[in-house]
Image (cartoon, rainbow, N blue to C red):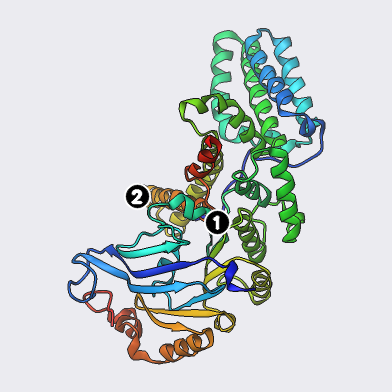
Amino acid sequence: MRGHAHLVGSYRPGSSPLHRMPLRTKLPLLLGLGTVSLAVQGMLPRTLLLLAVLILHFAAGAGWRRLLSPLKPMWLFLLVLAAYHWWQHGPGSAWQILAGLLACVYAANILLATTPVQCLLDALVAAVRPLQRFGADPERFALAIGLMLRSIPFLVGSFADVREAAKARGLERNPRALVMPALIGTVAYARQTGDALAARGLGDKDDGGQQAEKG
Amino acid sequence: MSSSAAGRVSFSNVSVSVPAADAAPGRDSGAPAGTRAILRGISVELTERRVAVIGGNGSGKSTLLRLVNGLVRPSAGQVRVNGLDPSVDGGRVRRQVGFVFTDPLSQLVMPTPREDLELSLRRIHRRGADRRRAAEQILAAYGLAHLADNSIYELSGGERQLAALATVLAVNPAVLVLDEPSTLLDLRNTKLLHRVFETLDQQLIMATHDLDFAAGFDRALVIHGGQAVFDGDAAGAVSFYRRLCADDAAWPRTLQQGPGHRSPSGNGVP
């Protein structure tokens, strides 16, 4: 079941300027590029913004394959959207929509490709720290998000495995042969992850440490 | 290494039973109706530095180990780890007890050894820079530095188990519980893992099928049919277990006859 977890959109170590840029500069930069590319109108500005994101993409050392892989799950959606805008408003509008969306997707892609998950989690912990006075535990929050980020590609991969196993037995059209094992696999994965965290004493409420802080 | 550095794990009259629809009442002595006993009346106090737990598949070894960090709760009796009850002080016990599974892929939850190690270290080092430095040191200590950013699926079985061990030891547990850590490994990797175990200060409680390795431990338990049928010196335990395996009458009838001759009740317990 664990065979082919597709680890898409994950961090690629490197030493490009974007890898070295601190998150407090990189996040606003990429978030800004994405937001502006949807906010401004007109073919030329949007094309230029997409171009800027693409330059950053290659500056970050992410290659062509990394450019194509996000398109795989969304090409049909993009095609239908572009076709509709072409029909309603003409080719210029269709290109504007595409350029804006792709700029956003690639900006997010750059962030994930050049920032280790642990750094993103640190930023998250810092962001939710003010909520600590209301009883929130930022570390547990970060752990939950980290596990979520990890689980999505794993579950996609495990569903692909189940589909292959069903196909091997000639059951690819049987919804029960597809849904039930995927469901059981998901629950098993959740339990396994819980055990794996317990095995290192992670995820339990950190009562000892907090009591020590309070004195 | 003296046993003074070791932890103290004690079981007093511990039983574990699970709900079982097909449980035949009366057949499993000690288990309430509608349940099946996995462990029965275990009473041991483990203070030695290296304790081996040996027994067949399904004998209850894993359940015994999981009682130590509270992943399994006793149905009756008491478990104590350095005076703490895992069912009450679960969090505190788990911070002292590291657990290594048979399959390292069950242990590693992040995509690369480095990320997984940094996840472990979050509890100790709140500052990112400290955590990265500590992770770097541990990776180097286990000879994993060149694999730090590889996908865990690209590592060999031995490298993976070593990475899993490193992520557990990174949080400095006082007791290390290992459930057949070398069962999936080849001979060379098994030896490598054993050499790492030799260097550890922690108390080790290890279930294993590697009888030659177990024979060198300070103490060993033989678990059979949910009971501790032998408790004493490791060499004695291993020879007891070898005799037990040679004695067909000691094993469930269904296992001897094979799947073609299943008895109506399904699980025959001697």
Identify the subunit bearing mark 2. Answer: A
Question: Could one spot residue B58 in this view of the protein?
Answer: no
Q: At x 73% / y 10%, what residue is drawn?
A: A44
* Mark 2 crowdedness (10 Å alpha carbons): few <14, some 14-19, many ≥20: few
Question: Could one spot residue B78 in this view of the protein?
Answer: yes
When asked about the image quadrant of residue B221, the answer is bottom left
Identify the subunit bearing mark 1. Answer: B
Camera-nearest label, 2 or 1: 1
Up-down: is B38 above or below A155?
below
Q: Position of residue B51 (x, y in %)?
A: 52, 75
Q: Nearer the viewer, residue B68 or A35?
A: B68
When asked about the image quadrant of residue B74, the answer is bottom left
Residue A178 numbered mark, or none = none
Q: At x 68% / y 24%, what residue is drawn?
A: A27
Q: Which residue is mark 2?
A: A176
Extreme-front residue of the structure: A215
Q: Which residue is mark 1?
A: B107
Q: Is residue B114 left or right of residue A158?
A: right
- Please, what secondary structure does the residue beneath circle 1 have? helix
Q: At x 26% / y 74%, what residue is drawn?
A: B266
When asked about the image quadrant of residue A100, the answer is top right
- Amino acid type at circle 2 is Arg
Q: At x 55% / y 37%, what residue is drawn?
A: A213
Q: Nearer the viewer, residue A33 or A156?
A: A33
